[in-house]
Image (cartoon, rainbow, N blue to C red):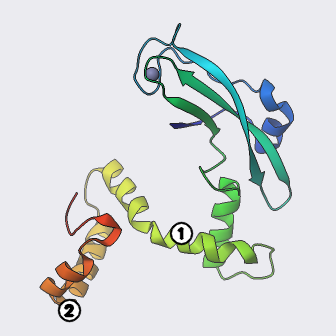
Amino acid sequence: MIIPYDLEVSLNEYSQKGKANDFPVFDQCPNCQCTSSGNLYRNGFYWRNAVTQEVELRIPICRMKCLLCKANISILPDFLNPYFQYSLHTILKSVEQALEKKKGNGYRQLWRYHLRRFIRNINWIHNFYIDNEGDINEKGKKEAINYMKRILDFGESSFLRRSWGHLSTYFMAH
Ligand SMILES: [Zn+2]
């Protein structure tokens, strides 16, 4: 499992400190919640890329292992997104610039891929805010009206059939 963690350093500082960063000490295993003492131990590092507009770095990621549940735990500094080489800031910046249609900024190669992923994940982002804000706000209602219209225009049963299995799920499943 991956734990995003605020190590209170920038990417450059993290890179300089390397294996000497102030990695967390957990009281409990983040996976099985057993007492960490005697169970959770540091299990070396793996190396990954961390790329920005300015630098391409190889940085160590701290690993832990729980003897009780056998979970492998990685401490991911929170300026990185799992499985993306580019830093979180670089990803967001490239999407932002693509949305503003700014060109010639060096983000060109990145923006297509990141923008597509961002747009594809709009729902997920949207759900996060809806779940966190609790109440249904005006913006949410406006979007709901828009999608209701699209479903009805498409035909409700056509929509049910065509959307069936999309992202391995179905209409109103969650
Ligand atoms: Zn455990």
Most distant residue in the top direction: 38
In this picture, residue 37 sits left or right of residue 151:
right
Image coordinates for residue 97, horizontal then vertical, percent: 68, 74
> Picture quarter containing residue 99?
bottom right
User: Residue drawn 86% across and 35% down?
Assistant: 16
Which sits in the foreground, 154 or 136?
154
Q: CA distance from mark 2 to mark 1?
A: 27 Å
User: Residue drawn 25% across and 54% down?
Assistant: 135
Helix, strand or loop at label 2? It is helix
- What crowding class fits label 2: few (fewer than 14 Cα within 10 Å), some (14-19), or many (20 or more)? few
Q: Earlier in the sequence, mark 2 or mark 1?
A: 1
Image coordinates for residue 78, horizontal then vertical, percent: 62, 42
> Picture quarter containing residue 130?
bottom left
Q: Amino acid at mark 2?
A: Asp
Q: Is residue 17 above or below residue 12?
A: above
Most distant residue in the left direction: 157
Image coordinates for residue 123, horizontal then vertical, percent: 38, 66
Image coordinates for residue 92, horizontal then vertical, percent: 63, 62
In this picture, residue 64 sits left or right of residue 122:
right
Helix, strand or loop at label 1? It is helix
Ligand 1 quarter of the rendering: top left
> Picture quarter containing residue 100?
bottom right
Which sits in the foreground, 49 or 101?
49
User: Residue drawn 66% across and 46% down?
Assistant: 79
In this picture, residue 148 sits left or right of residue 105:
left
Quadrant in which the C terminus appears: bottom left
According to the picture, the residue beneath numbered tag 1 turns out to be: 117
User: Residue drawn 60% across and 51% down?
Assistant: 81
- What crowding class fits label 1: few (fewer than 14 Cα within 10 Å), some (14-19), or many (20 or more)? few
Nearer the camera: disc 2 or disc 1? 1
According to the picture, the residue beneath numbered tag 2 turns out to be: 153
